[in-house]
Amino acid sequence: MKSVLGRRLTAIAGGAAVTAMVVLTASCAKEEEKAPETTTTTTTTTTTAPAEPTEKAPRLEPGGPNPFSPSVIAPPAPTATHPRHGN
């Protein structure tokens, strides 16, 4: 009998939550006045100086060295030995 009462209370609480969300959504949704549409035409002219590179990128040549490869090579990983077998 308590489970039936619990289910009813849960259903009522859920329905109240859904109703509250609908009411809040409806109260916040209002239509605002639209601004009158106007057409304006503007003309702008700009002059730009030629851009100078700030850095010189390395050249990539087919068959040549890769300038993006690392110069430091890490030492190999140490090898572990098994405590019982010794290898």
Image (cartoon, helix red, strand yellow):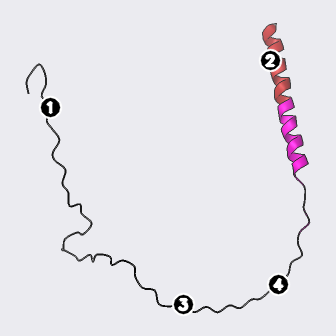
- Residue 35 in picture, x, y percent from top left: 88, 72
Residue 82 position (above or below residue 71): above
Q: Which residue is mark 4?
A: 39
Quadrant in which residue 71 is drawn? bottom left
Which of the two marks, 1 or 3, is nearer to us in this view? 3
Q: Amino acid at mark 3?
A: Thr
Seen at 87% across and 36% down, the residue is 20
Q: Are marks 4 and 1 in contact (CB under 8 Å)?
A: no
Whichever of callouts 4 and 1 sits on the residue coming sooner in the sequence is: 4
Q: Which mark is residue 48?
A: 3
- Residue 49 in picture, x, y percent from top left: 50, 91
Q: Amino acid at mark 2?
A: Arg
Quadrant in which residue 87 is drawn? top left
Q: Which residue is mark 1?
A: 80
Q: Which residue is mark 2?
A: 7
Question: In the structure shown, which secondary structural element does the residue marked by tag 2 occupy?
Answer: helix
The CA span between labels 4 and 3 is 29 Å
Left or right? Give the position of 61 relative to 16: left
